[in-house]
Image (tube, helix red, strand yellow):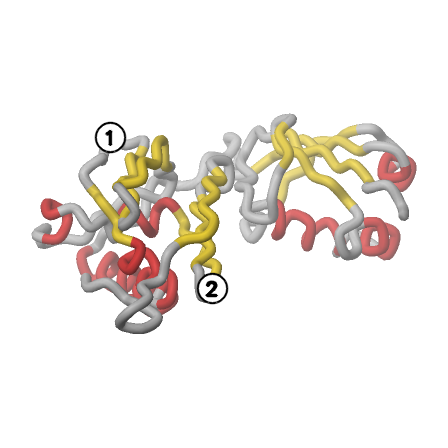
Amino acid sequence: MSDTTTNDKNPVAPTEINLHQKSRLLEIAFSDGFRFNFPCEYLRVFSTAAEVKVMEQPVHGKERVNISLLEPQGSYALKITFDDGHDTGIFSWGTLYELGKNYDRNWAEYLQKLEQHGLSRGDARVTDQEGKVVIKLVYFIELARISGKDEEEVAVPDSVTNVETLLNWMRKRGERWKEAFADDRVQVTVNKQFAEPYTLVEHGDEVAFVPRPKI
């Protein structure tokens, strides 16, 4: 995969790199203003490592892979170590830029290849014995008054996979919930750690909602 540059003399370079491990995302902002959120799975299956490039079948079963270590390689690239032990992929800034710009096309082609080979992205989602994803919701201040309780266990639909989709689902529980969860009014923690929109929500998690102070 060749490097992509904004022009021949000034290759794109990162201005900000943030690893969001709970969300399994690597966020990179580039010097031309573009910002990409790379799922760890995406980077793993599109690894630049030589042994990956020559595989007859696509890399698969990496849906829950995470990044364990980032190591800059001089001023031109980033070595990424994944928690499945893969540590031979070195991504130039141009390669990462290209992967970000072409994410939709690359991902669609990857999913098509998985289907053609009869492969899957990973294990089925963890559930209880009835096949439900059950999480514990904890409410603070006026949210506790709206719910009439400080906490509850709920089974969420399959569409709820992260904080963003959980908040969307909460807003649909009624008008009072819609107003309480409007805009950016609630701070969310997952398992007592501050969460982001793409932080994953899984069976057995504790999700707490804290109203932000009104300005």
Above or below for 143 versus 43: above
The amino acid sitting under disc 2 is Phe
Q: Where residue 85 is drawn, which disc sits there?
A: 1
- State the image coordinates of residue 58 (x, y, percent, origin top left): 19, 53
- State the image coordinates of residue 205 (x, y, percent, origin top left): 59, 30
Q: Residue at x 27, y 32 (%)?
A: 84
Q: Nearer the viewer, residue 22 or 135?
A: 22
124 to the left or right of 87: right
| Res 108 → quadrant | bottom left
Residue, far bottom: 7
Q: Nearer the viewer, residue 162 or 117?
A: 162
Q: Mark 1 vs mark 2: give the one in front.
A: 2
Q: Nearer the viewer, residue 174 or 43?
A: 43
For disc 2, the marked residue is 34
Above or below for 122 versus 152: below
| Res 36 → quadrant | bottom left
The amino acid sitting under disc 1 is Gly
